[in-house]
């Protein structure tokens, strides 16, 4: 599980989120941010040998070799895709994440 310094919220941290996502590292977001990105653009299917599509989401092999399940991916035009996913902690709480993929949207 990721231990990140902050949770970017839709209400207060939108600009900071846009800057943080450029790092290509996982960024923790709140549910409102997750839902915003799910609704603002149609999900994209990454065209890459490092992705195994499964519905809107799939499995993505990161550059470090680890495999991440994601719920959906998005891009606006011909830019790198961003993967979004959620996890459930042992205590039942849900956490939301985003990470820029080194895969350019071709649709």
Image (tube, rainbow, N blue to C red):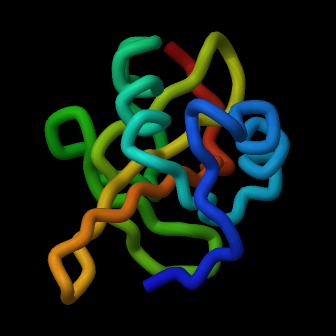
89 up-or-down from 31: above or below: below
Q: How many marks?
A: 0
Compared across the picture, whether 37 is left or right of 86 comes to right
Compared across the picture, whether 3 is left or right of 14 comes to left
Q: Position of residue 99 (x, y in %)?
A: 59, 53
Q: Position of residue 64 (x, y in %)?
A: 62, 80
User: Which image quarter holds the N terminus?
Assistant: bottom left
Residue at 55% across, 60% down: 28
In the image, farthest residue toward the front: 12
Compared across the picture, whether 57 is left or right of 62 comes to left
Residue 33 or 70: which is nearer the viewer?
33
Compared across the picture, whether 57 is left or right of 37 comes to left
Residue at 71% across, 25% down: 79
Residue 64 or 31: which is nearer the viewer?
31
Q: Position of residue 47 (x, y in %)?
A: 45, 35
65 up-or-down from 54: above or below: below
Residue at 47% across, 80% down: 66
């Amino acid at each position: 599980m990721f231990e990140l310094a902050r949770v970017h919220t839709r209400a207060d941290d939108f600009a900071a989120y846009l800057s943080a996502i450029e790092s290509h590292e996982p960024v923790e977001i709140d549910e409102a941010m997750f839902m915003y990105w799910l609704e603002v653009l149609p999900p994209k299917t990454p065209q890459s040998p490092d992705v195994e599509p499964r519905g809107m989401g799939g499995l993505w092999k990161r550059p470090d070799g680890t495999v991440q399940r994601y719920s959906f991916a998005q891009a606006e035009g011909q830019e790198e895709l961003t993967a979004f996913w959620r996890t459930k902690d042992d205590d039942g709480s849900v956490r939301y994440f985003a990470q820029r993929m080194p895969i350019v949207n071709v649709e």
